[in-house]
Each structure stands twice: as structure tokens, then as C-alpha cells.
Image (cartoon, grey):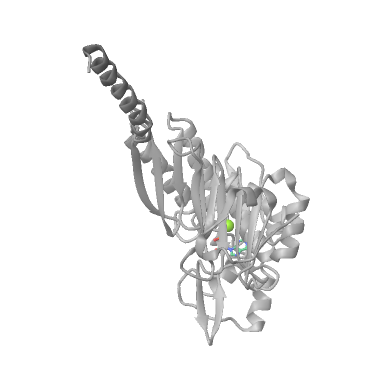
């Protein structure tokens, strides 16, 4: 072969090799660094993950800030820790109690959600939650008489929240009633964390506040959507995966906290009308939307309402911008169209019935 031909062949081989190698090189481009912190708070293990290289504020500082937000919210909102605003309010025996600005704001927002859901969410369900043993772990089944008496003590409209005065913010509650924010506190905290992240130079984060609340910030570092698994309420597996960007997810289900007595399962989601575990025919509800507080509060409320009322509620409130996946006790999934676009069934569940709601 002539020298010039040998040279051309070498050159072509080099070009070909480069062309083949480039996409491979692109495929293993280094992703921004992952930084993670686990925090135990609000009765659950939270995993806070942020991504970024060369952050102006160091990743450790951002994560410490997030942990601080979680811990301070927990101490404000706690109904079980003596320093908690709600603990003091519940022990005040009808006297008005000063609370922090954060607690006053969350109480106001939660009361609005109680009203919007016509009391399916009721943050004064706490005496019933306690009576069934969900706080102490000493589970018991209260008598019908006791349940009637407990139901009579559940009424969020009796909470009186004074407008902010120079002296601070005050809340009063009739003696015998108790408030707890367990149905909304994690979602509200996810929103606070999202604000904290937005104030940093992190653009990609996944805040997992335990099994019921997740807040995705931006997309995955490679630009693809986050993939969030949805638990099968009747088993160990995952029904499927939600692909989403910059949204919150709230899930409520009887499987998350329950006990069994004489072959009957009793769970922690209470129907405020009966003071007993809500038996609406649902086994879980997942809500996706822009607000963690709304997703958390609504997943609890829609679980109480059941499929029919819950679907009606979803139809009546487009302003909330939420999408919903209801799973009934027989395992059928009912999904709103926007959620259907984000959801794909896991292979093991492909024969499961999924009905798209309209
Ligand atoms: P979640 O896990 O978000 O569904 O919230 C359930 C928690 O909220 C329970 O552990 C109770 O502490 C409380 N809770 C139960 N039922 C209700 C209800 N109907 N309205 C408001 N809070 C509730
Ligand atoms: Mg909730």
C-alpha cells in the first residue's frame, strides 16, 4: 500500500474510533456530587439528598440548614414534647396559649384545609388518636360509648386563633379538646425545606420525609425526572413509579401504622365523625401537587372521604392543582388523568386493574 493510502486508512480509523467513542464518553460524563443526610424527626427517618459541585455555600452547610429547619419545626409543632406549642396548648385547659409564628401560620393553613375538606381532615381528632393507643403504643379498642364521647370532642371550628397582636400570637381551645398537626406537619416542613434549598445554589434535591411525604426539587442531576416508587398498601412491593419534576408527593394508608385485635386491623387514620379508624373502602391515597402541605393534608382527608367523595372533591377543586391515585381494598387503582401520565405500573402488577378517572 502506498504511503499516502496507509496514511488515509490510519486517519479514517481514528475518525471512526472517535465517532464511536464520543457517545460512550458522553454517557459516562460525571454527575454532580451527591450529598446526603439522615435526620430522625417527627417519628420517622428522613433522608435529605442534594446534588451539586463547587457550591458557593458548602453542601454540608446546606444540609445542616435543612436539618435545623426540620428540628425547629418538630419542636414547634410537637404535641408530645413539653416544649412543643401544641403540647402546651393541649395542656392549657381552655386558657389561651401563646404560640410561635410558625405554629400560628400552620394552624391557620391547616384549619383552612379542614374547612375545604368539610371536616374529613380535622386537626382536633387527637383525643381519638390517643384513645386508640397510636401515641403511646398501648393499643386498645375503645367502647362505643367512649367513641361517641370522643367524636363529640372533635371539631376544628372551635379552635380560636387570634390575629397577631403586638404581644404575640395566641390560640385557645375549649377544655377537653386537643389539637395535633400530624396529618400536615411533614408536608408543611417539606415546603419549608424547599424554600431553604431555593435560597441556596442547589438546583437538584430529593427530600424524603419518611414514607408519607416526598418533595422533589428540580429534576435529577442528569435532567431526567425523579422516579418515586408508590408502595403497594397490601404487600411489600411497589405498585409502580411516578416520574415527576419539582413536585411534592403525599401518601396516606392504613398500612403505615396499625394494630390487629381479634382478627380486625385498626389504623391511625381516624374518621372525625366516628372517632374510629376510617373505613372508606380505600387502602391508600397518593396525592401529587405543588404544595407539600396540601398533598399531605389531602392524602389523609381523601382517605377518610373514600373514592366517590374523594373523586368529587378532586373534580370540585382544580385550583389545588393536585393529581391523585386511589387504591381500593380490592387492589384496584383509580387514577386522575394527570397522575396517569406520570405513573407507570411495576412489571409484577401489570395485570392489576387501573381505571382513569374523569
Ligand atoms: P397521615 O399519615 O399524613 O395520613 O396523617 C395521619 C396522622 O394524622 C395520624 O397519625 C394522626 O395523628 C392524625 N390524624 C388521623 N386522622 C386524622 C384526621 N381525620 N384529620 C387530621 N389528622 C388526623
Ligand atoms: Mg397527611
Q: Which residue is located at x 43 percent, y 28 percent?
A: 201
Q: Residue furthest bottom?
A: 262
How far across and how far down the image is residue 164, in percent? 63, 40
* Quarter that holds the C terminus: bottom right
Q: Is residue 12 left or right of residue 317?
A: left
The mark tally for this picture is 0
Identify which residue, 357 or 321, lies in the foreground.
Answer: 357
Identify which residue, 238 or 45, lies in the foreground.
Answer: 238
Q: Which residue is located at x 45 percent, y 44 percent?
A: 206
Identify which residue, 56 or 160, lies in the foreground.
Answer: 56
How far across and how far down the image is residue 74, in percent? 46, 51
Q: Which residue is located at x 52 percent, y 84 percent?
A: 261
Q: Residue furthest front?
A: 1
In this rendering, the answer to whether 17 lies above or below 261 is above
Residue 68, located in which quarter of the rendered image?
top left
Q: Quadrant of ligand 1?
A: bottom right
Q: Is residue 258 left or right of residue 279?
A: left
How far across and how far down the image is residue 19, in percent? 36, 26
* Quarter that holds the N terminus: top left
- Residue 112 at least partly seen: no
How far across and how far down the image is residue 47, in percent? 40, 50
- Residue 27 at least partly seen: yes
Amino acid at each position: 500500500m502506498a504511503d499516502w493510502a496507509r496514511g488515509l486508512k490510519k486517519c479514517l480509523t481514528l475518525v471512526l474510533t472517535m465517532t464511536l467513542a464520543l457517545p460512550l464518553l458522553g454517557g459516562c460524563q460525571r454527575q454532580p456530587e451527591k450529598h446526603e443526610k439522615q435526620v430522625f424527626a417527627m417519628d420517622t427517618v428522613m433522608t435529605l439528598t442534594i446534588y451539586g459541585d463547587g457550591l458557593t455555600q458548602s453542601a454540608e452547610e446546606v444540609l445542616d440548614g435543612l436539618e435545623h429547619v426540620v428540628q425547629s419545626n418538630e419542636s414547634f409543632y410537637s404535641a408530645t414534647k413539653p416544649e412543643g406549642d401544641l403540647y402546651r396548648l393541649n395542656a392549657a385547659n381552655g386558657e389561651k396559649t401563646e404560640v410561635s409564628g410558625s405554629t400560628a401560620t400552620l394552624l391557620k393553613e391547616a384549619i383552612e384545609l379542614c374547612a375545604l375538606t368539610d371536616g374529613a381532615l380535622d386537626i382536633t381528632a387527637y383525643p381519638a388518636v390517643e384513645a386508640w393507643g397510636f401515641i403511646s403504643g398501648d393499643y386498645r379498642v375503645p367502647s362505643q360509648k367512649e367513641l361517641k364521647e370522643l367524636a363529640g370532642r372533635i371539631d376544628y371550628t372551635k379552635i380560636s386563633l387570634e390575629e397577631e397582636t403586638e404581644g404575640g400570637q395566641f390560640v385557645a381551645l375549649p377544655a377537653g379538646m386537643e389539637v395535633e398537626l400530624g396529618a400536615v406537619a411533614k408536608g408543611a416542613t417539606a415546603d419549608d425545606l424547599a424554600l431553604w434549598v431555593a435560597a441556596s445554589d442547589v438546583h437538584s434535591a430529593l427530600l424524603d420525609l419518611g414514607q408519607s411525604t416526598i418533595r422533589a426539587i428540580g429534576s435529577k442531576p442528569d435532567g431526567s425526572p425523579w422516579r418515586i416508587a408508590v408502595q403497594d398498601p397490601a404487600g411489600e412491593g411497589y405498585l409502580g413509579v411516578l416520574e415527576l419534576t419539582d413536585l411534592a408527593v403525599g401518601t396516606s394508608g392504613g398500612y403505615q401504622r396499625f394494630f390487629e385485635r381479634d382478627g380486625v386491623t385498626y389504623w391511625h387514620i381516624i374518621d372525625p365523625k366516628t372517632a374510629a379508624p376510617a373505613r372508606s373502602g380505600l387502602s391508600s391515597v397518593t396525592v401529587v401537587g405543588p404544595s407539600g402541605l396540601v398533598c399531605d393534608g389531602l392524602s389523609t382527608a381523601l382517605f377518610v372521604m373514600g373514592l366517590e367523595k374523594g373523586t368529587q372533591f378532586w373534580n370540585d377543586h382544580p385550583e389545588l392543582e393536585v393529581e391523585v391515585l386511589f387504591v381500593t381494598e380490592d387492589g384496584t387503582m383509580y387514577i386522575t388523568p394527570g397522575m396517569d401520565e406520570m405513573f407507570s405500573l411495576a412489571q409484577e402488577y401489570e395485570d392489576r386493574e387501573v381505571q382513569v378517572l374523569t
